[in-house]
């Protein structure tokens, strides 16, 4: 069975083994682009076991389109939250505050006298 665009397959190697993937683009003879229950990424064709199911999607279909077509086949896709960037907390400056600088200068002048 060939891995055409829209072919539903099962990952058989890696951390996502056993998950459902859908072919959304063919890169070359060895690699394809997949999406579905797996992270949207490039995948080696040797790491997939094609099934007899084929969904109607266009090349480079969005994640939402793939999910809606998989729901028609009663395949549930768990949605993950996108990573939120942490807000940068300003680092305390290494310099002494201006007030302490002034006090240090005044103390030095007094000690010289």
Image (spheres, rainbow, N blue to C red):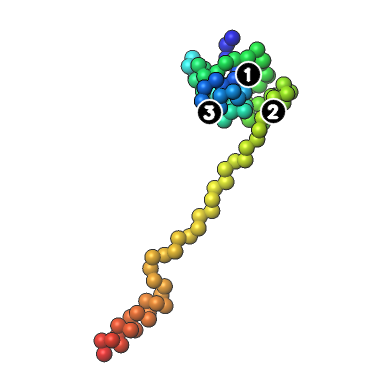
| Residue 59 appears in the picture as rendered | no
- Looking at the rendered image, the quarter that the N terminus falls into is top right
User: How much space separates mark 2 and mark 3, taking CA atoms?
Assistant: 19 Å
* Residue displayed at 72% across by 21% down: 73
Q: Are marks 2 and 1 in contact (CB under 8 Å)?
A: no
Q: Is residue 49 left or right of residue 77?
A: left
Q: Nearer the viewer, mark 2 or mark 1?
A: 2
Question: Which percent across, then down, holds residue 3?
Answer: 57, 14
Quickly name the residue at label 2: 76
* Residue displayed at 66% across by 21% down: 57
Crowding at dot 3, Cα within 10 Å, few <14 / some 14-19 / many 20+, comes out as few
Q: Is residue 96 left or right of residue 23?
A: left
Quickly name the residue at label 1: 8
The numbered disc on residue 15 is 3
Q: Secondary structure at mark 3?
A: loop
Q: Are marks 1 and 3 in contact (CB under 8 Å)?
A: no
Q: Secondary structure at mark 2?
A: loop
Q: Earlier in the sequence, mark 1 or mark 3?
A: 1
Q: Quadrant of residue 36?
A: top right
Crowding at dot 1, Cα within 10 Å, few <14 / some 14-19 / many 20+, comes out as many
Q: Secondary structure at mark 1?
A: strand
* Residue displayed at 65% across by 35% down: 79
In the image, residue 98 above or below residue 70 = below
Question: Which percent across, then down, holds residue 35?
Answer: 59, 26
Q: Are marks 2 and 3 in contact (CB under 8 Å)?
A: no
Q: Is residue 74 left or right of residue 94?
A: right
In the image, residue 96 above or below residue 31 = below
Q: Earlier in the sequence, mark 2 or mark 3?
A: 3
């Amino acid at each position: 069975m060939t891995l055409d665009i829209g072919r539903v397959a099962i990952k058989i190697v890696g951390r996502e083994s056993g998950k459902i993937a859908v072919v959304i683009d063919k890169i070359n003879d060895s690699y394809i682009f997949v999406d579905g229950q797996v992270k949207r990424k490039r995948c080696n064709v040797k790491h997939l076991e094609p099934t007899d199911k084929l969904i109607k999607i266009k090349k480079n279909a969005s994640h939402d389109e793939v999910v809606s077509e998989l729901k028609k086949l009663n395949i549930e896709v768990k949605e993950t939250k996108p990573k939120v960037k942490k807000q940068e907390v300003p680092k305390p400056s290494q310099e002494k505050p201006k007030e302490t600088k002034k006090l240090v200068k005044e103390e030095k002048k007094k000690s010289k006298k």
